Image: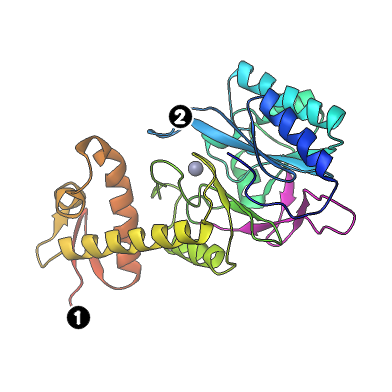
C-alpha cells in the first residue's frame, strides 16, 4: 500500500529511505514517520497477526511489541536498528495499547534487545506488573513522542477504556490514529465481561469518532483509509446488536445460553462461544440502563416502574 498522506514535513528523501528500509524488513510505510509490521501472535481468529506500529522519527515508539516468537522479534529489532542507522530515527520506547497477551508478548525481550523503556497506562501497568514490573505510566492526553521535526508536537495518547481498562489510542494532530483494539480491521472486537465494559467502550468509540480521525491503523488487519467511517460502522453495529439483545428479552426469565440463539442467530455457530461473552456484556449494559432485570442466572426485560 502506498503512503496514505504526506504531511510535507521533513525532506522527501528521508521518507524514501524509510520506505526502502520498511520494504526490506517486511513492513509497510503508511505515512511519513509511520510504519506497520504485522507479525504472528496468538490472537482471536480470523486474525493471525498483530500490527507492530512504529511512529517516528525522533522520540520514536514501537506500539504493541506483541509477538512472542523469536523470529518476529528479531525482524522487528532489525527494522528498528536499520531505521536508526539509515533513516535517522531515534527510538524512545515501546508503548502498550493494553494488557492482552496478543499485544505484550514480545515486550520484555524487545525492550531488552533495544535498551528501551516500556510505556503503558497505569491500569495496564498494574495488570502486567508481574511480567513487566517497570512500565512508565502514560496518562490521558500525554504527548508520547513520534515527532518528525522540532516544531512537530507528535502523537498524543488518549485513554479509551472499554475493551480493556487501560486501553490507549494514539492520535496524530493531523488526524492519523493508531487504534489498538478499539476497532477491528479483521474479525471483531470482543468486549469480554471479565475485563471489558460496554458503556465505556461505546463512549471511547464516540470520543475518537469526534476527533474526527483520518486514516486509522487497527491492531489487527490492514490500514483503514477512512477511520471515521469505520468507527461509525463499529458504533452502529454495536448499537444494533444491543437492540437485538433487548428484543430477545421478554417477561420470561431466560439463561444467557437460551438468549444466545435469539440475539445472535445471524452469526456463524462457531463464533457462539465468543458471542456468549459479548452477550453478557450487552446484558450488563442493559441492566445498568434499567432495561434488563437479572433473576439469579436468568434475564428478563425490565418492567416499567
Ligand atoms: Zn485486546
Under circle 2, the secondary element is loop
Q: Outermost residue, left direction?
A: 252
Can residue 177 be seen at all in this image of the molecule? yes
Q: Which picture quadrant has residue 35?
A: top right
* Residue in view at x 25 percent, y 65 percent: 243
Can residue 117 be seen at all in this image of the molecule? no
**Residue 261: percent from the left, percent from the top?**
15, 48
Under circle 1, the secondary element is loop
**Towards the viewer: 184 or 11:** 11
Q: Residues within 10 Å of mark 1 (few under 14, many from 20)?
A: few
**Residue 15: percent from the left, percent from the top?**
77, 41
Question: What residue is disc 1 on?
Answer: 304
**Towards the viewer: 162 or 244:** 244
Question: What residue is disc 2 on?
Answer: 48
Q: Outermost residue, top direction?
A: 71
In magenta segment, residue 139: yes
**Towards the viewer: 284 or 86:** 86
Task: Tell me if 247 is positioned left or right of 166 in this view.
Answer: left
Task: Tell me if 99 is positioned left or right of 268 in this view.
Answer: right
| Mark 2 or 1, nearer chain start | 2
Looking at the rendering, the stretch of residues picked out in magenta corresponds to: 136-161
Q: Residues within 10 Å of mark 2 (few under 14, many from 20)?
A: some
In this rendering, the label closer to the viewer, 2 or 1: 2
Q: Quadrant of the N terminus?
A: top right
* Residue in view at x 26 percent, y 71 percent: 291
**Towards the viewer: 72 or 221:** 221
Q: Tell whether circle 1 marks a residue whose Cβ is less than 8 angstroms from ligand 1.
A: no
**Residue 139: percent from the left, percent from the top?**
70, 57
* Residue in view at x 77 percent, y 43 percent: 56
Q: CA distance from mark 2 to mark 1?
A: 46 Å
Amino acid at each position: 500500500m502506498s503512503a496514505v498522506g504526506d504531511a510535507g514535513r521533513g525532506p522527501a528523501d528521508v521518507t524514501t529511505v524509510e520506505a526502502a528500509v520498511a520494504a526490506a524488513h517486511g513492513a509497510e510505510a503508511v505515512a511519513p514517520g509511520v510504519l506497520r509490521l504485522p507479525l504472528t501472535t496468538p490472537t482471536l481468529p480470523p486474525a493471525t497477526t498483530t500490527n507492530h506500529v512504529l511512529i517516528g522519527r525522533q522520540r520514536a515508539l514501537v506500539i504493541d511489541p506483541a509477538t512472542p516468537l523469536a523470529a518476529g522479534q528479531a525482524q522487528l529489532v532489525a527494522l528498528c536498528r536499520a531505521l536508526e542507522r539509515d533513516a535517522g530515527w531515534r527510538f524512545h520506547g515501546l508503548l502498550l495499547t493494553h494488557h492482552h497477551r496478543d499485544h505484550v508478548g514480545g515486550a520484555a525481550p524487545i525492550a531488552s534487545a533495544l535498551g528501551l523503556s516500556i510505556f503503558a497506562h497505569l491500569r495496564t501497568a498494574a495488570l502486567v506488573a508481574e511480567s513487566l514490573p517497570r512500565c512508565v505510566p502514560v496518562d490521558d492526553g500525554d504527548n508520547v513522542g513520534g515527532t518528525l521535526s522540532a516544531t512537530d508536537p507528535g502523537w498524543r495518547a488518549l485513554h479509551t477504556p472499554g475493551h480493556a481498562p487501560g486501553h490507549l489510542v494514539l492520535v496524530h494532530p493531523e488526524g492519523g490514529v493508531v487504534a489498538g483494539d478499539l476497532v477491528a480491521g479483521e474479525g471483531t472486537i470482543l468486549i469480554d465481561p471479565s475485563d471489558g465494559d460496554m458503556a465505556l467502550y461505546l463512549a471511547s468509540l464516540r470520543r475518537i469518532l469526534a476527533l474526527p480521525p483520518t486514516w486509522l491503523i487497527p491492531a489487527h488487519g490492514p490500514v483503514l483509509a477512512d477511520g471515521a467511517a469505520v468507527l461509525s460502522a463499529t458504533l452502529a453495529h454495536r448499537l444494533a446488536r444491543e437492540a437485538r439483545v433487548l428484543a430477545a428479552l421478554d417477561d420470561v426469565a431466560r439463561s444467557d445460553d437460551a438468549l444466545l440463539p435469539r440475539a445472535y442467530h445471524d452469526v456463524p455457530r462457531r463464533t457462539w462461544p465468543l458471542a456468549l461473552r459479548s452477550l453478557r456484556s450487552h446484558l450488563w449494559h442493559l441492566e445498568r440502563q434499567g432495561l434488563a432485570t437479572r433473576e439469579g442466572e436468568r434475564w428478563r426485560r425490565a418492567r416499567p416502574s
